[in-house]
Amino acid sequence: MKGESHADDLCWITKSHHPFRIMRGEIPKASNKTFTIVRNPLDVLPSFASLVNTTTHGVKPDFSYDKDYPEWWDWYVRKFAKKNAHFFADTVRQTRETKTPLYIVRYEDLVNEPKETLLGLMAFCFEIKDARGTNLERQIDKVLAKGSEATQFYKMKTVTGKFDANRGMYTEDQIKAVQEAFGEWMYYYGYADTEGNPTGFFYKGQEHSEE
């Protein structure tokens, strides 16, 4: 994608989560403002495994991590759940220490309510109270009217856009390990199964998954 390899003024928005930065335990790069896109960790971990093994977002290996390499998968789940949780903690801590504005976007909200979610994000980026009625809204409408495939720069995996699609890959103990690793972040990002939260813990599959 354009600008993906740049981390300077040539690009307006730069990535902080290149897989090797997380693998090395590096903190996110400093910025003028930060927005973070989060997702159900049970869906993130298999996706991230494919990314670091293929170095692409659209390719998935022809083997099954949990069935063909169960020992590796168990190690990976426990190791990288902690690494990803630490990365989120470092991101939030850095924004607090540098007093950098932080905006949170959930992947599931982008799928369910793309326009409202993007309006909020653009209002944050352009430092305006409301993006409705502006050219930003018109541009968002144009993009959404083309359908999801029009915005895809690479072939998506079959589970893209689906919620809780990978729960079957985890043993009960592995799910507990993910819960322990992400702990407070599940509450911070609104994924915890608490009273008044209709999404439930990890976006329960029976309510949100597509068959």
Image (cartoon, rainbow, N blue to C red):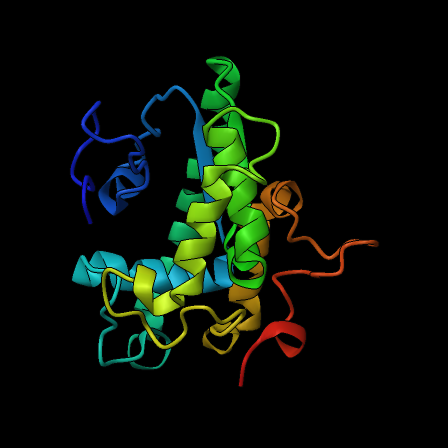
Q: 49 left or right of 117?
A: left
Residue that lies at the very extreme toward the bottom in this rendered image = 211
Q: Position of residue 138 (x, y in %)?
A: 47, 47
Q: Nearer the viewer, residue 51 or 143?
A: 143
Whole-percent x, y for residue 103 in the image: 53, 33
Residue displayed at 40% across by 69% down: 160
The image shows residue 139, relative to residue 210, as above or below, that is: above
28 vs 69: above or below: above
Residue 71 visible in this rendered orientation of the protein: yes
Q: Quadrant of residue 119?
A: top right
At x 31%, y 26%, the residue is 29
Which residue is nearer to you in this view: 27 or 112? 112
Q: Position of residue 53 (x, y in %)?
A: 20, 61
Q: Position of residue 67 (x, y in %)?
A: 35, 81
Location of residue 24 (image quadrant): top left
Picture quadrant of residue 132: top right
Residue 78 visible in the displayed image: no
Residue located farthest toward the right when viewing the structure as drawn:
195
Count of number-bearing discs: 0
Taking the spot 26% from the left edge, 59% from the top edge, the residue there is 51
User: Which residue is painted at 38% across and 65% down in the image?
Assistant: 146
Residue placed farthest to the top in the image?
Answer: 98
